[in-house]
Amino acid sequence: RTWWVDQRLSWDPADYGNITTTLYLAEALNTPEESEIWLPDMQPYNTMEGTIRTLEPAAARGDSAGRIFWSRPGILDVMCKFSGLVAFPYDRLKCTVEFGGWSMSDGFQ
């Protein structure tokens, strides 16, 4: 789930029958030509497979202030480095998932 503000998608509800929300076609990054709006290039850096294969396409919800909310159902398989395992099966394990822009990152490609 993510959200952002795109002022280009704002409107005055009084001009459109007091409609305050709408849905936009928002496809995955592998088919940007099918999206009606700009989508952030956000990927987990330590994933086993890219989100193109693991997250389903989903519509984005926008409101009259230009706030966009986009949530895609799916499962992320991430690679984790675990150390210790000294109290199995009572260990408390932690896995950090790093998200960022793949095409605009420094050194992660």
Image: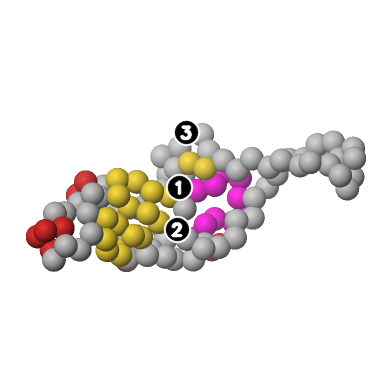
Q: CA distance from mark 2 to mark 3?
A: 26 Å
Q: Nearer the viewer, residue 15 or 34?
A: 15
Q: Residue at x 52, y 57 (%)?
A: 51
Verify CB contact (< 8 Å) between mark 2 and mark 3. Answer: no
- Label 2 element class: loop
Tell me if residue 1 can be seen.
Answer: yes
x and y, in percent, of residue 43 in the image: 50, 48
Residue at image mark 1 = 42
Residue at image mark 2 = 71
Q: Nearer the viewer, residue 58 or 45?
A: 58
- Label 3 element class: loop
Is 50 one of the magenta-colored residues? yes
Q: Residue at x 23, y 49 (%)?
A: 65
- Label 1 element class: loop
Q: Which mark is residue 106?
A: 3
Verify CB contact (< 8 Å) between mark 3 and mark 1. Answer: no
Left or right of 52 in this view: 86 = right
Mark 2, residues whose alpha carbon is within 10 Å: few (<14), some, or many (≥20)? some
Residue 83 quadrant: top right
Q: Earlier in the sequence, mark 1 or mark 2?
A: 1
